[in-house]
Amino acid sequence: MLFRSEETKESFERDRVINAILSDTIIDYKADRSKLIQFHNGTHSLGGVPFRYLSITHERVDTGISSEILNYQQIPTSVMGAYVEPLMNRQLVIIRDVEAITEASFKQLMSQQGTTAKCMYPIFDNAGRFTAYITLDYVGRTVPVNENGVCICDTLVREAHTIENILFGE
């Protein structure tokens, strides 16, 4: 068993590495904001149905971009709407235009952050549960593409798997 100070030291080291990865994604994917969003339990309804929430646990922003970590806590998972299914199926989700989002709550949440486009990739624990996702926000512009017209976010899986290993081990 680890002593409390050793647990704290490991926690800070894990946070440092995750933050470094998110900082790198801002450069590598030309993103404005990079976030790790994790799911957590909330409360239960009177009938015993659990409420699930999501919160930003780690965030990095480019110069001149607002930080949203304090504004994006305890968000009901229901706001994600149809975007949950492709993430649960381990798919990269690319939203090229937030204005085209049909999920009203999710669209409003993104618009409040100034996000005009985004990429999301899921993170799973060792038991195969969808526990988090990494997301790249683009503010005032669309998702960048390479010289072949392919979204440059298509390799975001690398960073997601690295974060999975940091959070849950190999």
Image (tube, rainbow, N blue to C red):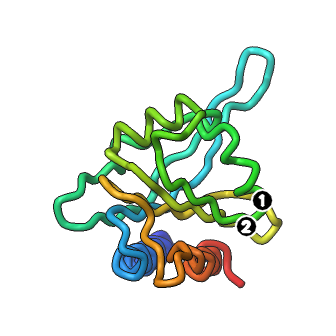
Q: Do the residues bearing badges 1 and 2 touch, measured as CB atoms within 8 Å?
A: yes
Indicate left or right for 3 with 161 as reference. left
Name, please, the residue furthest toward the front.
Answer: 148
Callout 2, which amino acid? Answer: Asp
Q: Residue at x 44, y 54 (%)?
A: 117
Q: Residue at x 19, y 66 (%)?
A: 63
Quadrant (top left, top right, bottom left, bottom right) of the N terminus: bottom right
Q: Is residue 9 visible?
A: no
Q: Nearer the viewer, residue 158 or 132?
A: 158
Q: Position of residue 37 (x, y in %)?
A: 52, 55
Q: Determine the secondary structure under disc 2.
A: loop
Name, please, the residue furthest toward the left.
Answer: 64
Q: Residue at x 81, y 65 (%)?
A: 128
Q: Position of residue 164 (x, y in %)?
A: 64, 74
Q: Position of residue 7 (x, y in %)?
A: 50, 73
Vertical placement of residue 61 versus 156, above or below: above
Q: Which residue is mark 2?
A: 125
Indicate left or right for 59 with 163 as reference. left
Decide: few, some or many residues near mark 2? Use Cα within 10 Å; few <14, some 14-19, many ≥20.
some
Callout 1, which amino acid? Answer: Arg
Q: Position of residue 67 (x, y in %)?
A: 28, 53
Q: Nearer the viewer, residue 155 or 9?
A: 155
Which image quadrant for residue 161?
bottom right
Q: Is residue 117 visible?
A: yes
Q: Which residue is mark 1?
A: 129
Q: Determine the secondary structure under disc 1.
A: loop
Decide: few, some or many residues near mark 1? Use Cα within 10 Å; few <14, some 14-19, many ≥20.
few
Name, please, the residue furthest toward the top.
Answer: 46
Q: CA distance from mark 1 to mark 2?
A: 5 Å
